[in-house]
Image (spheres, grey):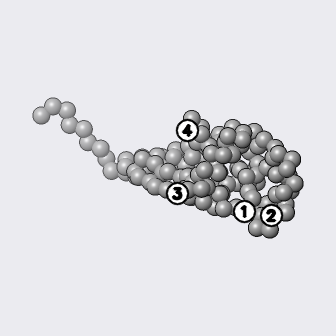
Amino acid sequence: MGDEIADRVRVHTQLGGKDVHGKAFKKYSPGYAERKPKIKRGGSTGSKVNLTLTGDMMRNLQVRGFNKNGVVIGWSGVNAQKVGWNDEMGRTVTTKAKPVSSGIERFINKQVDSSVKKNTKEATKKPITFTIGK
């Protein structure tokens, strides 16, 4: 599920060009918008703000850990710094208060709900006997 969430964050960011709140990213500065298409390794052209110059930052979004209660996805090293720099420039991919967009949150809730229903059906296949008293 962590990989699916990371993929959905990439799509929301790169194809949607939207921040975690669902708003279009703040425009690039005129100088950067002019330089971006000229970068030979560039993974994106044009003026659409999608936080993709080389693609490295969004490729670095991966599952970083998991346990029985959840999964941690995120960036490491310089790519984590890039996410922070973009946030400072008004291009917020994630926050502590809102780690994923509302659409991704709905997906997560749907998956969890489905899993709970499946596990409940499995757990209740056998009769449950309650003994009260001795």
Which residue is nearer to you in this view: 104 or 44? Answer: 44
Look at label 1 and name its amino acid: Thr
Give the distance between the C-alpha atoms of the residues marked 1 and 2, in whole angstroms. Answer: 9 Å
Which mark sits nearer the N-terminus, 1 or 4? 1
Residue occupying the point 64% across, 48% down: 83
| Label 2 sits on residue | 39
Which mark sits nearer the N-terminus, 1 or 2? 2
Residue occupying the point 72% across, 41% down: 89
Vertical position of residue 97 compared to residue 16: above or below: above
Q: Nearer the viewer, mark 2 or mark 3?
A: 2
Task: Single out the residue that lies furthest toward the front.
Answer: 31
Mark 4 touches mark 3? (CB < 8 Å) = no
| Label 3 sits on residue | 63
Task: Single out the residue that lies furthest toward the left.
Answer: 134
Mark 1 touches mark 2? (CB < 8 Å) = yes
Mark 2 touches mark 3? (CB < 8 Å) = no
Q: Is residue 107 left or right of residue 53?
A: left
Vertical position of residue 17 compared to residue 40: above or below: above
Q: Nearer the viewer, mark 3 or mark 1?
A: 1
Give the distance between the C-alpha atoms of the residues marked 3 and 1, in whole angstroms. Answer: 21 Å
Which mark sits nearer the N-terminus, 4 or 2? 2
| Label 4 sits on residue | 96
Q: Is residue 109 left or right of residue 92?
A: left
Look at label 3 and name its amino acid: Val
Q: Secondary structure at mark 1?
A: loop
Which residue is nearer to you in this view: 92 or 117? Answer: 92
Look at label 4 and name its amino acid: Lys
Q: Is residue 101 visible?
A: yes
